[in-house]
Image (cartoon, coloured by chain):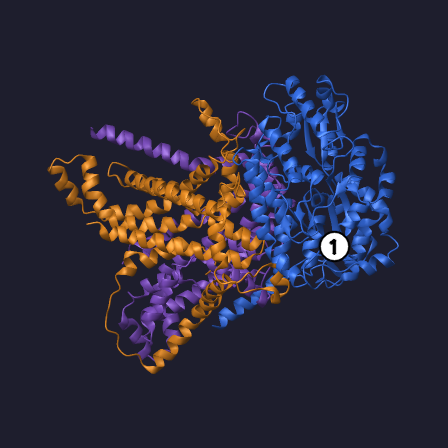
Chain colours: A purple, B blue, C orange
Amino acid sequence: MSRGLAKTLLYAVLLVGAALTAFPLLWMVSASLMPTGEAGTFPPPLLPSAPTLEHYRALFARADMGRYLFNSALVAAAVTTASLFVNSLAGYAFAKLRFRGRERLFQALLAGLVIPAQVAMLPLFLEMRALGLVNSYAGVVVPAAASIFGIFLVRQFARSIPESLLEAARIDGATEFAVYWRVALPVLRPVLVTLALFTFMGSWNDFMWPLIVLTDDDLYTLPVALATLARERVQDNEFMMAGAVVTTLPVLLVFLVLQRQYIRGIMLGSVKG
Amino acid sequence: MRGLVLLLAAVAVAGCGGAETDGVELEFWAMGAEGENVQPLLDQFEAEHPGVRVHLQQLPWTSAHEKLLTAFAGRATPDVAQLGNTWVPELAALGALEDLTADVRQSGVVEPADYFAGAWDANVLDGHVLGVPWYVDTRLLFYRTDLFRLAGYDRMPGTWAEWEEAMRRVKAVQPEGGHPILMPVNEFEPPLVLGLSTADLLRDGDRYGNFRSPEFRRAFEFYTGLFRQRLAPATSGSEISNVYQEFARGRFASLITGPWNIGEFQRRLPDDVQGSWATAPLPGPEAGTPGVSVAGGSSLVVFARSPHPREAWALVEFLSRPDVQVAFNALTGNLPARESAWEASGLADDPYARAFRDQLRHVRPTPKIPEQERVAQTLRTYAEFAARGQMTADQAVAAMDADVDRILEKRRWLLSRGRAGGGGR
Amino acid sequence: MSTAAHTDADLATAIGPAARRPRRRRPRPPTAAASRAAVWFVAPALLVIGLFFVLPVLAALALSLTDFDLYALADPSTARFVGLKNYLELARSGEFWRALGNTLYFVAVGGPLSVAVSLGAALAVSSKLVRWKGLWRTVFFAPVVTTLVAVAVVWRYLYNAQYGLLNAGLGLVGLGPVDWLGDPAWAMPAIIGLAVWKNFGYNMVIFVAGLAGVPGELYEAAELDGAGPWARFRHVTLPHLAPTFLFVGVITMIGYFQLFAEPYVMTEGGPLRSTVSVVYLMYEEGFKWWNLGYASAVAFVLFVLMLAGTLVQLRLQRDEP
């Protein structure tokens, strides 16, 4: 096979693949701009005959989308803030502070990763009930405030902090917390950005636990609200597409801006030793 | 560390915000079309009760039961809610509902004698009133009179055998590929109403499934026979994008459905079909035995955890007022639970509603036990297997009994210890 | 912790090359002051993980030995210790075996398919002949970051039997129409389609990194030996990717075992229960019918299955030369 032919073929494959991959998302946007009922005609149109924003207006005016957007943003921001702090503290300690049982404790944490989160969900609900946190933002945020993955990520990165840097601060009389806060954290910034991205997106997209623990629609996050709407308004294609756009656009934009950091996170979690 | 505590505190506070209004705020949950359309009535209630505000939450029917139980489990129940009346025993058994017996006795508005007896009874457990019927609902036939006439029938026949014969003839005059009847396989009501016509769903004081009994088998085989003879399509409701269009085109000559569709048919069917459809009570299994349907509908309940039981009852009472019932009928098409509202709204003279009134005289409740919803879903699941030809009728009823017996195991144990929710005898 | 936000990545890290190569250095004995400080550093995380993960997991094990249900929520005295009865009932339940079969179908077909597409995309994107690598990668990766519930809603319409674009497209080439989500035989393949589309970008990125690690001289040497593209792929690329394969295989399997949102949004487990997965069954039993004891047993069986699947893959990997 000649080089030119191979190149042509390769580009053809990539183009078709990219078109297929992007198509559902593009159609989602296109259909969300169609007048009511247009997406349900045959043959199905690809582009709106007369683009309209009526569904977006309806979402915010009648379906309380603003509220869900706020809930999602609040929950994701709270989870991200809390878990950045908690995980970086622990990850740093596991990497740089020596204490009895450190290795064994860390191994135990890693072993916990093989247990799927769903196993914990049923008793967790009862626990939340006892704490009075069912149907509250805290019911979603508090259990997510620490993650084994986050601790691991920070630890991997923190191990490369030169010991001399920390010692220098200690000799200057800094407390351990000050060493962490003033010396380690600035060095850890890249991994913290990555962890923040992972946590924010994970929390934004999370579905099962918020579905379980939130009962009042005033507190619904976007995925829960969207799943509920989807059951109620099966026939309203264009409206539902607008809802899907509002739900997914924020994370998509964040990704487009910060994809380098995001993809580095996958690398850190998998390949880098 | 302190930052974390502050943050968590902030989140916790945000979670329970909004409780500092002067008056009383009632949380009211309503389902489906009721939830979508009831707001004007709530506005009226607020106008009549200064200081009381009502916050409405709409639940989709498909997840309403789930949400109610979750709310109970998480101690997050509303003040007032609409409940499918078969769910009343369930939430009552859990102790989730306020006993309304005294309120009803003292009420100048809620008069038990004015209600359809079957609907009222569904809310009474061991002599305690736990809910007030909001509207009544039952399932019967909507059919194309012109197609049935073309097949030689001026009215819906009275027995199953004649009904089946009529459907065969209708099939012959229908457009190619059409079906005489639509019974979506994702609904439990069609097999349920047929089964109730001949059998009890449960036996021995609602301790075991009764699906393998000859009585139930008879109804179930009639049901599956309609699919086998291609008189009914084995499709679920969600696969049919527009039921009204298909009905107008004659691709379905009839369907088993509920009263809200009177309004939908009047709105959505094209003009040229408007004169050629009617409603009819269900045919009976044999001559002289009227067809039985299910005593459905929704009730209004007050939750035991409500901090405002007085205001909550005031809302129930308001929604039960005959004039409000008439307005509710106009908003949603639901049939009022009170006979006086039928007179006032002119429903009593409505040709389409008349069949419902007749059918409502021949309704049976489903078993008044907490497990009823699950029993109904089990019936639905295996009826679908049989309708789609994936199980024989024998296998399906055996599976129903096996599953239902397992579901009722806890109930049997509780009964043996002298305690169980609802209907225990 | 419980949010399952990073489950894939989580496990990945645990079994990934990083975790398997701990750099052992004899630690100096800790000073008392450092130890005390360290306790405060790890305490918040351990508290959260202990209270909201470890404790519930242990409680789930205990719960699975009881018949804790809705009655017991109202009155705890009605809960009974039933030993292994829940597990025995699972073994006898057609519903459970159906859910297990559906899940294994999803894992066994969807998993490899997804890995294959990832590898294909990675090879294409990594090719020396291709420019604008970043652009391709971004497009292929975009579905990964979208909200699953939202795209499931979108795909539900694409799959619509009457006016869905998929059937319209198939119609152009004379195929179909297929009632994707309404036909018990097609509903699971349809969900697999969505899952592959949504997930392949993630593994693609990992494969791209793996491919970058293959030394270029090896290709040149193989080319000098007269090896064609396929032979080079077979004898150079694949062996070098083996650790990556293990990693990708395990995280994909684990993610796919947790199938839930797709059937919840698209099919509600239907038609004919053909898309009820083990997690969906657990959700139904636990959070719809509130049989918490029984549902906990379902959850533990899922855990054991995932663990077994992981061990099998590790073993397969080790057995290979």
Give the structural element (helix, strand or loop) at label 1.
strand
The quarter of the displayed image where residue A229 is located: top right
Residue found at the far left of this picture: C225
The quarter of the displayed image where residue B219 is located: top right
Q: Give the class, few, some or many, for how many residues have Cα within 10 Å of label 1's Cα (few <14, many ≥20).
A: many
Q: Nearer the viewer, residue B273 or C201?
A: B273
> Residue under circle 1?
B301
Q: Nearer the viewer, residue C317 or A250?
A: C317
Counting from the top left corner in percent of width and height, residue C73 is at 61, 62
Label 1 marks a residue whose chain is: B
Residue found at the far bottom of this picture: C32
Residue found at the far front of this picture: B214
The residue under the point 33% across, 72% down is A102
Left or right: C58 as drawn, with respect to B344 = left
The residue under the point 34% across, 82% down is C32
Counting from the top left corner in percent of width and height, residue B315 is at 79, 54
